[in-house]
Amino acid sequence: MSIKQLTHDLQHRRISRRTFMQQATAMGITLAGASSMANSAMAATPKPGGRLTVGFAQGSSSDSLDPATYANDFMFSLGYAVFNNLTEIAPDGSVQAELAEHYEASPDARIWTFNLRRDVAFSNGQPLTSADVLATLKHHTSEQSTSGVKPLLAQIIDMQAPDAHTLVFTLAGGNADFPFVFADYHLGIRPAVKGKIDPATRIGSGGYSLEEFEPGVRAVLKRREGYWKAGRAHLSTVELNTIADPAARMSALMTGEVDLIDRPDLKAIHMLKRVPGVKIHTANGTLHYTMPMMVNAAPFDDANVRQALKYAIDRESLVSKVLKGYGRVGNDHPIASSMPFYASELPQRQYDPEKAKHYLRKAGLSSLDVQIHTSDAAFSGAVDASILFSESARQANINLKVVREPNDGYWSNVWMNKAFCTSYWGGRPTPDLMFSAGYAADAAWNATRWQNPQFNKLLTDARAELDQQKRAAMYAEMQRLCRDDGGALIPMFGQYVSAMSDRVQMPEQISEMWDLDCLRFIERWWVA
């Protein structure tokens, strides 16, 4: 037997610690080494119980339990803990069934049939049925809805429930990626009452019940007994806190006030590395930082001005000074190098003040005065990034005034409201979902108001194209259009960085789709 198999058996309680020690030392491992390995193996085994206290960078007083309004990681994580979706993103990045037990498509991927699990009940005892799914989806697709997921659901031209556990979706065109849509954080299933859901309901089928909720401040979750998912929802209690100030968030971790924080201040992360009992966790993924320009507002309605600004930012400097090396430069489109159909042949845009001046001249300008609205609520280091942008832009005769906005209410008052601001995206698992959510003409979260007819036609055509080579060419052209015509300046992709007590444990493989195990850490992680 190998030491790897021996460790695996201890993790799964197939052997005792004593047996592990005896066999490990018999293999020539020192007593101290075997003891250390045993401690690590046992810590890696999910342990029920315990309390996890979290300090989130985000969370706003305008937050609501209505899933159509979810707009930050605090609410996304809360939603995934209390509610379940039809599908979920697995640790390897694939899509897998959650409330759905099975799903299949017609040969042209235009008609999809989903069969629901029969062992799921909501926290009020009501069994899950197809009526609950239909009512939830209609909440996001109604004429009055402003839900961020509404554009992704627009492809559904008909949805029927032949029986209590079957759903049939007919799409406007084929879409091989369709099951990914239902993993979106807006689409946690709520119980139906007379064909509708109560958007403010706390009744879900997830592993936790919501005991307390103060928007922008705090939420307390308690584990539900008899959760239908085996091997999930280990923690007894989870407390979520909004601690917008990075220094305060890091201090809370160092003093033991919280066990886990997201988005530590990268300028001061070296301090955390010196604290006993604290560990840093990083993950590559689709996280990217953006500076959306509204193309329907002057001067951003001129593509030459947009190009000038894109050449006036020193991307390498931002990665080095803001991300402290925890990331890589962006190329003004949202598709990460780890995603399918990434256009590696697209030239990387470099900082070039002279080329920026060239595009200003094409716009009939010798200089440019413009404001960018920012806050570290957008992302940790957003203010510093804006100041660095202002300094590099000065070399291109661009006077970029940095307007610092309050952290509270940033996502409701600044993003999607100011013509030029800072933002971020956690990304999506496929190019179709990413483009559909934030770049399609009718996308609720199209922060730039960009409407490019060629792009929108390609988006529809690529979704239905079954020839993968042709599909790749279409997505490459969409990335080029975003880069050269779009309103989103995307200077950098970042690693997901979090910090936590060494009590906090996680599976060996976690999802890197979004931060904190695809924001499902509450039901997947545990404390030692």
Image (tube, helix red, strand yellow):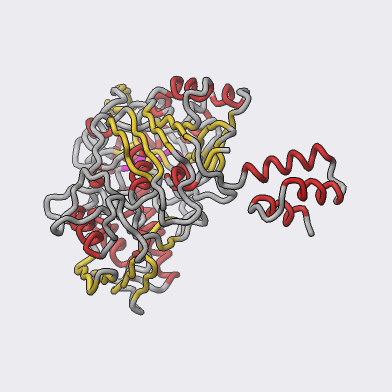
107 or 298: nearer the eye? 107
Q: Which residues are magenta?
A: 488-492
483 or 199: nearer the eye? 199
Question: Could you say where residue 487 lies in the image, as x and y percent from the top left?
Answer: 30, 43
Is 166 magenta? The answer is no
Question: Could you say where residue 443 lies in the image, as x and y percent from the top left?
Answer: 24, 51
* Residue at 59% in and 24% down: 270
Q: Is most of the magenta stretch helix, strand or loop?
A: strand
Question: Could you say where residue 126 lies in the image, as x and y percent from the top left?
Answer: 26, 57
* Residue at 37% in and 70% down: 103
234 or 456: nearer the eye? 234
Q: Is residue 177 left or right of residue 451?
A: right
Q: Is residue 491 left or right of residue 186?
A: right
Q: Which quarter of the image is occupied by the C terminus?
A: top right
291 or 348: nearer the eye? 291
* Residue at 37% in and 35% down: 356
Q: Quadrant of residue 332?
A: top left
* Residue at 23% in and 45% down: 201
Position of 393 relative to 192 (above/below): above
Q: Is residue 163 left or right of residue 511?
A: left
Q: How many marks?
A: 0
Question: Could you say where residue 459 lies in the image, as x and y percent from the top left?
Answer: 31, 61
Instruction: Tell me if I can see residue 28 in this picture.
Output: yes
Instruction: Tell me if I can see residue 358 in this picture.
Output: no
Q: Which quarter of the image is occupied by the N terminus?
A: bottom right
Q: Is residue 234 left or right of residue 66?
A: right
Q: Quadrant of residue 313?
A: top left
